[in-house]
């Protein structure tokens, strides 16, 4: 049996063959987990968000249009889920509290390796970016997606994505400089 592409599998899910969603899950759950892990820095939450993404894919499968790539639609669902999660959490936890907790945790571990410190600095800086800016950096730099694919995911033009990525990287650079005690 030849491997079916994602779009064909999703069409089968839409037609009632929900067991085909398991194949889509197997193909994409690791990438989706890594996407959420970089957004949230929380393994357990990332696992939950992957599961919830596939539940939403099943729930809203009728809204999928086969003309679009499945992965584009999947990341749209995932991005919306992440934003929903942030909206629910915002009143409960401030970004400052999260940032301070991560700083305390890093201090307790006492890592003195320069590479680890740089990685920690980048992670902290990423948490301080606006969610949409964090998302475009993750999709473009960590997942290696082309700007056209990102434009489809977030629903804007390719030139807008280019500008957003440029501004997001500049903002990330500014935050890293600020956190490391450099000139602003």
Image: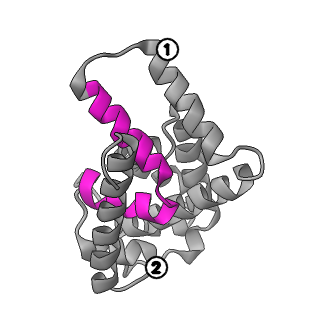
Q: Is residue 130 magenta?
A: yes
Measured along the vertical axis of the image, is residue 156 above or below residue 7? below
For image coordinates 60% across by 60% down, the residue present is 83
Residue behind mark 2: 65
Residue 119 on image: x %, y %: 30, 34
The answer to whether residue 138 is seen in the rendering is no
Q: CA distance from mark 2 to mark 1?
A: 49 Å
- Residues 157 and 16: in front is 157
> Viewer-proximal residue, 74 or 102?
102
2 or 1: tag closer to the N-terminus: 2
Residue 11 placement (x, y as % from top left)? 45, 69
- The residue stretch that appears in magenta: 116-143
| Residue 117 percent coordinates (x, y) | 31, 28
Is 98 rendered above or below residue 5? above
In the picture of the structure, the residue carrying the numbered disc 1 is: 108
Q: Please say whether residue 53 is one of the residues in the magenta stretch.
A: no
Q: Is residue 90 above or below residue 107?
A: below
Q: Please rate how many residues cluster around mark 1, counting C-alpha atoms within 10 Å: few if below 14, some from 14 to 19, many from 20.
A: few
């Amino acid at each position: 049996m030849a491997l079916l592409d994602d779009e064909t599998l999703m069409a089968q899910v839409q037609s009632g063959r929900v067991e085909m969603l398991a194949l889509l899950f197997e193909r994409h759950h690791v990438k989706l987990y890594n996407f959420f892990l970089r957004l949230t820095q929380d393994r357990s939450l990332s696992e939950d968000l992957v599961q919830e993404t596939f539940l939403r894919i099943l729930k809203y499968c009728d809204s999928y249009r086969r003309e679009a790539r499945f992965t584009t639609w999947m990341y749209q669902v995932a991005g919306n889920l992440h934003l929903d999660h942030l909206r629910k959490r915002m009143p409960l936890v401030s970004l400052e509290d999260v940032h301070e907790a991560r700083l305390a945790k890093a201090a307790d571990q006492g890592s003195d390796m320069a590479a680890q410190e740089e990685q920690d600095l980048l992670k902290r800086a990423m948490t301080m970016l606006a969610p949409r800016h964090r998302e475009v950096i993750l999709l473009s730099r960590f997942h290696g997606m082309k700007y056209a694919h990102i434009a489809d995911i977030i629903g804007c033009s390719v030139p807008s994505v280019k500008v957003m990525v440029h501004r997001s990287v500049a903002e990330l650079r500014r935050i890293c400089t600020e956190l490391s005690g450099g000139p602003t």
